[in-house]
Image (cartoon, rainbow, N blue to C red):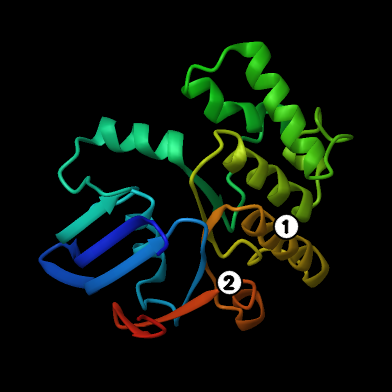
Amino acid sequence: MSEVLVRLEKVTKVYRLGEVEVPALRGVDLAVERGHSLALMGRSGSGKSTLLHILGLLDRATTGRVLWDGQDVTGFRADRLAELRGRHIGFVFQTFNLVPTLTAWENVELPLVFLGVPGRERRGRAQAILEQLGLGQRLRHGPHQLSGGEQQRVAIARALAPNPDLILADEPTGNLDSASGQEILKLLSDLHRQGRTLVMVTHDAEAAQIAERVLRLRDGMIAEGAP
């Protein structure tokens, strides 16, 4: 039986807009197993990104429980959640979120700086990952000197730098042309085959095919694909 890395139990999320309550998740139960891959699909407003943010400890559930590697982290302070995120979760976003004033090398180093990794070690680790992803000739290039596909590979390298247990990708091909998108999907698929746990939000049915399991959300609930 596979080990569960992160589990949600009856999770709800309600956003308040003035005096109006907007429910984003309605009693979600979900187990993400270590080493598996999962795609989250659904229309805009279905709760996909909210679910991803709660899995990544970026947002708190309104009610319900979140268990990380068997430990209930629902009531953890913000600093403890930030430490868990920094050490164990890598994020890949549709808009890349690279620091424009830093080189590719420096962007990948950044999470290691926050973790207190010594300079020589973090520079070596960042270089090795960028070279592994085919960016060895782009180490000292800024984001504005890179194509969209190259920027996303830098973002993936940054996510990999702390050697995370979980990679969360929110529409990772959404800002890319078809060829670059295929390259990124192949890269994510290869990372999963190497043993990484992957959860990806996507509108693209073709992109979802790289995942072992596809969940469809509707109105803040899992409508299809859950056991």
Vertical side of 37 occupied by 156: above or below: above
Under circle 2, the secondary element is: loop
Amino acid type at mark 1: Leu
Among the 4 quarters of the image, the one containing residue 82: top left
Q: Is residue 108 left or right of residue 139?
A: left
Q: Name the residue located 74 percent from the left edge and 63 percent from the top edge.
A: 186
Q: CA distance from mark 2 to mark 1?
A: 13 Å
Q: Position of residue 218 (x, y in %)?
A: 35, 84
The residue under label 1 is 187
Under circle 1, the secondary element is: helix
Q: Is residue 62 visible?
A: no
Among the 4 quarters of the image, the one containing residue 104: top right
Bin the neighbour count of mark 2 within 10 Å (Cα to Cα): few under 14, some 14-19, many 20 and up: some
Q: Is residue 181 visible?
A: yes
Q: Which of marks 1 and 2 precedes in the sequence?
A: 1
Q: Position of residue 135 (x, y in %)?
A: 83, 40
The residue under label 2 is 211
